[in-house]
Image (spheres, rainbow, N blue to C red):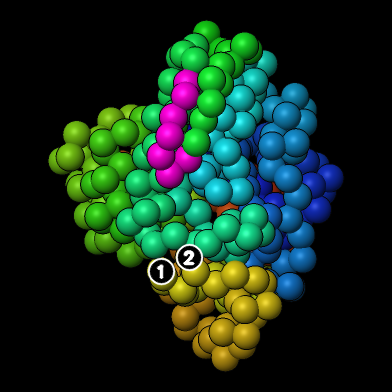
């Protein structure tokens, strides 16, 4: 049966309120949670960006939910530090933590002052990071000279079972590439035909493990309010690569999204006041074979969404 989780969006919500939200989501019937990991929001209107790894320790302690995080090692984060973070959470909360690894966005990574590499270089750097992280989680002492440098690193605190390292992808080509190294695949909602192609590419290339999907939704009791929430909070997030990869600041995203039409937002976010439509959309994703679906209500106020979906949407999906 598909697991339905709550997505914790650090770019939009203060970490204290986000902790309250995920505790409430567990009580309302959500099965799991996942977390973003950004240094910068996508828009000044979002206005937050807490440190995910501090928050994850608190959230794992405060709930009994399994958690995942989407992380980009290699520039802002050294892979040995990410291996240590993964290993510590895995040791403290066995079987409850996974990490999805991707190549990142300049909006988070430019802060180091290092040049932002081409996509092919970022892929190669990520693959080196994955190998370093796996070796460290396996207890090896690691030295490595390449796109990342590691000198005699060893993890002294490790979980008995290393947490899964999930591949993050939004394209068919990247999904196929992730099959070389990942313990599962995660992507975001898109037309079902595209999602099916990604799943097929991953599996046909030998990809193993669970399929995760993050779904952007906007719900309110009235359609106009649901549309207004999505337009205010998520119109800066509608741009396809390479734009979303290469812009550097929230101000850049706000400038390029100033004249985005609502129709562009509703092609990225499932926007409706009709809970039946949300059930239908989510059922389509279930039928594609996703093992875990994390719901991200793009508004900054989460409680009404959590209560309503917990009482009226999730039960219908589980009974289907």
Between 119 and 273, the one nearer to me in the picture: 119
- The residue shown at (43%, 34%) is 145
Front residue (pair 308, 196): 196
Above-or-below relation of 66 to 292 = above
Number of labels in the image equals: 2
Quarter of the rendering occupied by the N terminus:
top left
Task: State the extent of the magenta-drawn residues as a range.
Answer: 142-148
Pointer 1 with pointer 2, Cβ within 8 A? yes
Q: Residues within 10 Å of mark 2 (few under 14, many from 20)?
A: some
Q: Which mark is residue 18?
A: none
Does the magenta segment cover residue 19? no
Judging by the rendered image, the residue that carries numbered circle 1 is 241
Q: Residue at x 57, y 58 (%)?
A: 114
Q: Nearer the viewer, residue 153 or 207?
A: 153
Position of residue 123 measured from the top left corner of the image (x, y, whole percent)? 36, 50
- The outermost residue toward the left is 204
Distance CA(mark 1)–CA(mark 2): 6 Å
Can the viewer see residue 280? no
- The quadrant in which residue 33 appears is top right
> In the figure, is residue 193 to the left or right of 9?
left
The residue at which mark 2 appears reads as 245
């Amino acid at each position: 049966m598909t697991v339905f989780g709550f997505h914790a969006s650090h770019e939009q919500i203060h970490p204290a309120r986000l902790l309250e939200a995920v505790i409430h989501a567990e009580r309302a019937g959500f099965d799991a949670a996942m977390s973003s990991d950004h240094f910068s929001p996508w828009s000044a209107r979002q206005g937050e960006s807490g440190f995910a790894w501090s928050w994850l320790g608190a959230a794992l302690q405060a709930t009994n939910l399994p958690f995942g995080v989407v992380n980009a090692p290699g520039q802002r984060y050294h892979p040995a530090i990410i291996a240590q973070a993964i290993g510590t959470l895995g040791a403290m909360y066995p079987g409850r933590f996974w990490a999805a690894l991707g190549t990142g966005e300049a909006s988070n990574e430019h802060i180091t002052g290092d040049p932002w590499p081409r996509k092919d270089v970022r892929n190669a750097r990520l693959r080196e990071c994955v190998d370093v992280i796996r070796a460290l989680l396996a207890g090896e002492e690691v030295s490595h000279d390449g796109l990342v440098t590691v000198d005699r690193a060893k993890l002294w605190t490790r979980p008995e079972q290393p947490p899964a390292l999930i591949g993050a992808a939004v394209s068919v080509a990247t999904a196929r590439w992730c099959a070389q190294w990942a313990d599962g695949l995660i992507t975001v909602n898109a037309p079902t035909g595209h999602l099916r192609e990604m799943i097929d590419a991953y599996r046909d290339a030998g990809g193993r493990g669970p399929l995760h999907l993050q779904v952007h939704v906007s719900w309110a009791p009235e359609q106009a309010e649901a549309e207004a929430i999505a337009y205010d909070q998520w119109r800066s997030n509608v741009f396809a690569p390479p734009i979303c990869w290469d812009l550097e600041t929230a101000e850049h995203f706000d400038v390029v999204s100033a004249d985005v039409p609502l129709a562009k937002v509703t092609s990225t976010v499932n926007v409706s006041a009709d809970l039946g439509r949300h059930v239908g959309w989510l059922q389509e994703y279930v039928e594609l074979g996703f093992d875990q679906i994390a719901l991200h209500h793009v508004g900054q106020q989460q409680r009404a969404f959590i209560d309503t979906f917990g009482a009226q949407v999730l039960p219908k999906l589980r009974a289907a």
